[in-house]
Image (spheres, helix red, strand yellow):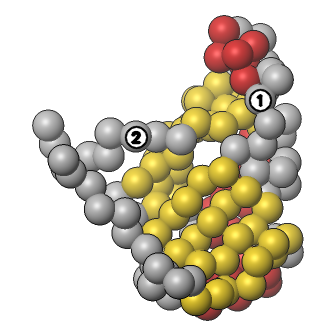
Amino acid sequence: MTDAPTLYPTLVYGDAKAAIAQLEEAFGFRRSALYEGEDGTVLHAELTYGNGAVMLGSKKEGVFAEAMGKAGPAGVYVVVDDVDAHCARAREAGVEILMEPTDQDYGSRDYMARDLEGNVWSFGTYVPPLGP
């Protein structure tokens, strides 16, 4: 196994292009792949942050879109070094902040935001321990 992540949150958006723009501008994600259909829909995109990534696409026909059709918004947690600066960037980009940067009892500093289509993004300093 490589050092690459083995878990990739996958989201679908009504306007995947707007979602990509917001994730890049407000949260600092970097686009690593973008595949579009002939009609301009996003068939598949990959955005990275640190050594993690999220995959997303446009809501469309197909097995995955059908399976996700009745799913609610998703929640994704991302580890960041400077929670306050990250939150300030998101706020400046017009993102809805659900929880201001807050020190948690378990030692993390976190904030929460909602993207354009209702998904909840949590950003914090807590790094979950991995392993057996």
Would you say 73 lies left or right of 103 here? right
Instruction: Specify the farthest residue to the front.
Output: 105
Q: Quadrant of residue 6?
A: top left
Residue labelled with disc 2: 7
Dot 1 surroundings within 10 Å: few (below 14), some, or many (20 or more)? few
Question: Residue placed farthest to the left in the image?
Answer: 1
Q: Give the residue at x 32% y 46%.
A: 5
Badge 1 element: loop
Q: Position of residue 62 (x, y in %)?
A: 70, 9
User: Image quadrant of residue 26?
Assistant: bottom right
The residue sitting at 55% across, 60% down in the picture is 77
Check the image and report above or below for 43 versus 23.
above
The amino acid at mark 2 is Leu
Question: How much space separates mark 2 and mark 1, taking CA atoms?
Answer: 19 Å
Q: Are marks 2 and 1 in contact (CB under 8 Å)?
A: no
Query: Left or right: where does residue 83 sit relative to residue 16?
Result: left
What residue sits 77% from the left and 43% below the top?
73
**Picture coordinates of residue 111, whole percent (x, y):** 66, 77
One can see residue 36 in this view: no
**Residue 15 location (% of width, % of height):** 83, 40
- Under mark 1, the amino acid is Ala
Q: The N terminus appears in which quarter of the rendering?
A: top left
Q: Which residue is mark 1?
A: 71
